[in-house]
Image (cartoon, rainbow, N blue to C red):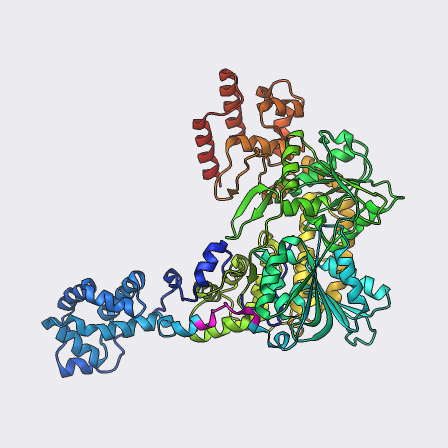
Amino acid sequence: MRRCAWPLLRLPALRPAASAAASSAAGGDGGSRAPDTSLFVPVPLKPVGDAAEEDVGAELTRPLDKGEFLKNLNKFYKRKEIQRLGAENGLDARLFHQAFISFRKYIMESSSVSADLHIILNDICCGHVDDLFPFFLRHAKQIFPMLDCMDDLRKISDLRLPPNWYPDARAIQRKIIFHAGPTNSGKTHHAIQRFLSAKSGIYCGPLKLLAHEIFQKSNDANVPCDLVTGEERVYANEDARPAPHIACTIEMCSTNTPYEVAVIDEIQMIRDPARGWAWTRALLGLCAEEIHICGEPAAIDLVTELMYTTGEEVEVRNYKRLTPLTVLDYALESLDNLRPGDCVVCFSKNDIYSVSRQIEARGLECAVIYGSLPPGTKLEQAKKFNDPNDPCKILVATDAIGMGLNLCIKRIIFNSIVKPTVNEKGEKEIDSITTSQALQIAGRAGRYGSSFKQGEVTTMHRDDLAQLKEILSETVPPVKAAGLHPTPEQIEMFAYHLPDATLSNLIDIFVSLSQVDGLYFVCNIDDFKFLADMIQHIPLNLRSRYVFCTAPLNRKEPFVCTTLLKFARQFSRNEPLTFDWLCRHTRWPLAAPKNIKELVHLEAVHDVFDLYLWLSYRFMDMFPDATLVRDIQKKLDDIIQVGVSNITKLIRASQTGAAPGTAEVMSEDFPLSRPGRDTRAVSDRHAAKSTEALSVAVEGLGERRGRNLKAYRSATKHDDLKSHGRGSLANRLLREGLLTQEMLRQLESEWQDQHRNGRYGLSSKRDDSSKETRKKKK
């Protein structure tokens, strides 16, 4: 799912996304923790050159003997008393050493120094090295300016009382109502009914699709409602008068406007490592007489605790699922067993491509939905699948269907129960889906009001079914902490004290010094820092730089990142980004895609248009052609819809004539293999074992992924895997970029070893060799 952007409005100050224990330790005791001094970048201080004024010190005493001075300076460095004095003034061992190196270099390379320092330097030749400390400390504070303002920086980054950031909300007594229940329980419906009956209201949802749905529903019910997303504001009134009701993405909600009713949807996302701050801000800051919160029961305790700190009570209304949901006792096992109303859920785009092609090879038509598709294309594919008169009766989708789309699904089929995730530290992992994720996806089956009165859920592979049942039977762990993030105002205050620091460095120091209690954590800032480093060389004022760094883009998309860089460069020259410029850059108009590579590029261009619109909402004078861009974005949406409708043809074209394009798509996803019952998180910094390389190859073809080579041989219908080095399967894998010649040789060697040993497992020695090979490759 595409990362949503922070608004230009005031944001809540926001603890690093680390474990709850670490976070509460950071600020729970009310004390200040030691800063991470590795983040302190010294400011360069140039030595005094020959062009300096007359050397007064030399006239008053005598010229410096720098050889003798160097010996005494080394004595100064080694003295325990000096090191203790340095520590008392904020110089730990790291800073003390850096300051000493800089001080020594400054003295040795300067042609002259100030008179008072010159006199002291001559005196220490007589043994008074301690007298040098005040000058050393003055130099240290010049290259590390944060030492002089550490108390101020700690106060700015003190995040222990977030409720106090919203005085308007604290000035009223709000009524908090928590609508708790599973998917398809009617909890959001009841909250929306109250929203529609109010004189004024605001709906805050996680997706543009959800906000758009409420926008349409309100206006269809003759309740004027505006739509506000990161890219635009759509007025219900023709004269552009603001309507009393607003449906918005949660990042865009205003904490200054009073409302009668506010609805906060999917409150459990308050724990999200990247976006949790937006739910915290809405929950604590919305000025509404009634706040209706919708989400999982797992968030009840945290919301109650947070509201206790604001002096507000929480009324909980529990809901049960409106239609039954059954976990089947058998797996699908073959795509031949698909029936109308089935939805195959995959967790990688590669699996989406592969499964959809296999389905259509069986003479069935299928709809396709995945996260990077434009909203219009998703809606069109959902409409196609839901239409009883359309021959398309099968859906292949990622977990993007978990929210935001109304779908008539009879049975959910998990193609896999492992998926790529990003942990609280910003590291990529491959792990089993969580109970919350499984329930959210499975709950889409048998939607109330659809043609299916009950839902079913199963897996594609028999070995996964028992684990899925176990996951679904577990209780969703309670939400323990709410996200926070630094505000522009806080970063500006940091920049005032540290004018020479980069924005990325300011953020790092802020997080290092931040203090929070056990109810909060600071959201992951890696995406922000990535963009900050990317545009650091471009001359921008701090506020504009901050806005560019909060832009909603996927940093895995090079074309979009390059475009942001060009936007920032032209913005810095005060040259407006016109429609003509954007058309030249994107080579608009564009034709329908002929292969997967071209489809992926069109999706990236759509994201570029989104980026332009997002920036135009914040810098209208510099991005003046939002209306024209919005028009061509709709045309591009139609083109992408045509491509997705013919996706199997694109896959076929990629495999026969545009293999490099397919390989590019493949490289964006995680290599997935089906782990056993004791699945463990695997960081992307660690190479997969050689058995996983084989699983990747089988996955790429969409065949059944087994744990041993016998299952693999059965799925691919090969009598002997030894022939893979010469057979058509290997050629197809090589063409698609799923297999390299090196991997092919290694697999053949491993197969021969296994064949000789009469077993299918690999020796630990072979595992280690494979792991090392994959590490070198990465």
- Does residue 448 appear in this view? yes
Image height of 692 relative to 199, above or below: above
Image height of 534 relative to 728, above or below: below
Query: In the image, 216: left or right of 147?
Result: right
Chain part drawn in magenta: 155-163
Q: Residue at x 16, y 70 (%)?
A: 129
Query: In the image, 194: left or right of 596?
Result: right
Q: Which of 303 and 272 is in front in this view?
A: 303
Measuring from the top left, give residue 733's x and y in whole percent: 62, 32
Q: Residue at x 64, y 33 (%)?
A: 466
Image height of 513 relative to 438, above or below: below
Measuring from the top left, give residue 342's x and y in whole percent: 78, 39
Measuring from the top left, give residue 131's x and y in whole percent: 18, 74
When asked about the image quadrant of residue 162, the answer is: bottom right
User: Residue placed farthest to the right in the image?
Assistant: 389
Q: Which of 295 and 511 is in front in this view?
A: 295
Query: In the image, 34: left or right of 213?
Result: left
Image height of 207 relative to 775, above or below: below
When asked about the image quadrant of residue 744, the answer is: top right
